[in-house]
Structures are given as C-alpha cells and as structure tokens.
C-alpha cells in the first residue's frame, strides 16, 4: 500500500481491518455495492454500519469481493492489513502557560494552595506531562497575588474611562448554619 495510512478522523487507532472484521467477519455475507463498471447487483444488501465504511466501499472485482479505498481509489483484498494511524499532533509544551492555567484553576474552584504539595496531584500532573515542573504553594500564592494586582489595575483603568454611573448593590445575610455572607 506504499506505506500510506488512513485515519478515521481520530476516532480510533485500531486498524480498519479490525472495524471491517468487527462488522462483517472476513467480508462474508451478501453485500453488493457498485462495482468498477457501476453496475448494480440485484442481490440482497446488508447495511454497512461500521465507521470504516465512510472510507471504503465493498466491491466485486473479477468475482472476488474486495474493499475499495475512497481516498486512494485502490482495491484491497481482505488479507491486506491496513494500519490506521493518526498523524502525530505536534504538541508544544509551555511551562508558563501550564503554570498560569494551574493558577486559574485553583482560583476558579477555590482549591487550597497546598493542593500542589499533594502527592496524588503531583503524580497526576507528571502523568500528563513529564516536562511540567511543579511549583510550590508559595510560588502559586505569588502567582495569584500578581494576577490579582494586574486584574485590579486593568479594572481601575476601565472604571476611570467609564463616563457613566456604576451602581454596586450589596446584600448581607446569616445562613441557618450561623454563617454570615455578603453578596455583591
């Protein structure tokens, strides 16, 4: 097959042959699809349901049932092994982007800063990318404070440029658990 591979749009890394065998075994059955001369067969047809059939047609060539690749426009017999491999995606790792996303996650979900010291979290992060250098809780705290100050400054600039009025409404309550809260 000239070392060319087909991908199922990333749906599976298993060979097409697996998908075809999964649905129809060794291409057995009474499935007739248009052949090379575009003649229709009058035999009963069985519905082809595997995702693989979006890339292949079942054809008869010289009385032999084969699969025709829609991309390469070639016939392939059932004994041919087709490797389906995704093209490797070029992943660019950026420590600063990952560090910023970690900080945003901790702030957004109100996780404790000590989370970065937990062995389970460290193992999880290492499993995602070995290149990520885990930061300490103090570094995380400094990142949070730096981001807070940056966002605060940009909000001040935005409010200073505003020529209209701004109303801030607050509400205070005590929950049944005797916990006080404030709402802005």
Image (tube, grey):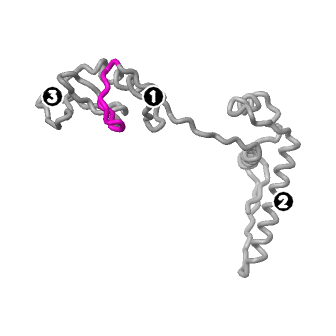
Q: Earlier in the sequence, mark 2 or mark 1?
A: 1
Q: Earlier in the sequence, mark 1 or mark 3?
A: 1
- Residue 46 is labelled as none
Q: Residue 139 at x, y = what percent?
A: 86, 44
Q: Residues within 10 Å of mark 3 (few under 14, many from 20)?
A: few
Quarter of the figure that contains the C terminus? bottom right
Q: Are marks 1 and 3 in contact (CB under 8 Å)?
A: no
Magenta part mainly helix, strand or loop?
loop
Camera-side residue: 135 or 167? 135
Label 2 – label 1 distance at C-alpha: 55 Å
Label placed on residue 3: 1
Residue furthest to the right in view is 138
From the top left corner, tell me how far across and down residue 177 is, in percent.
76, 46
> Magenta residues?
68-79
Few, some or many residues within 10 Å of mark 1 (<14, 14–19, 20+):
few
Q: Nearer the viewer, mark 3 or mark 2?
A: 3
- Residue furthest front as drawn: 2
Element type where label 1 sits in the image: loop
């Amino acid at each position: 097959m000239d070392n060319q591979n087909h991908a199922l749009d990333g749906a599976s890394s298993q060979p097409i042959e697996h998908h075809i065998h999964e649905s129809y075994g060794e291409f057995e059955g009474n499935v007739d699809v248009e052949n090379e001369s575009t003649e229709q067969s009058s035999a009963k047809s069985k519905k082809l349901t595997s995702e693989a059939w979006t890339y292949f047609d079942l054809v008869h060539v010289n009385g032999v049932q084969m699969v025709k690749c829609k991309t390469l426009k070639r016939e392939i017999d059932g004994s041919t092994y087709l490797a389906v491999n995704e093209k490797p995606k070029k992943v660019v790792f950026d420590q600063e982007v990952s560090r910023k996303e970690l900080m945003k996650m901790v702030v957004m979900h109100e996780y404790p800063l000590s989370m970065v010291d937990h062995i389970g979290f460290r193992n999880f992060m290492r499993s995602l990318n070995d290149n990520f250098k885990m930061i300490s809780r103090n570094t995380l705290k400094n990142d949070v404070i730096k981001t807070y100050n940056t966002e605060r400054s940009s909000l001040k600039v935005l409010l200073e440029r505003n020529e209209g009025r701004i109303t801030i409404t607050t509400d205070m309550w005590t929950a049944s658990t005797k916990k006080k809260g404030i709402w802005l």
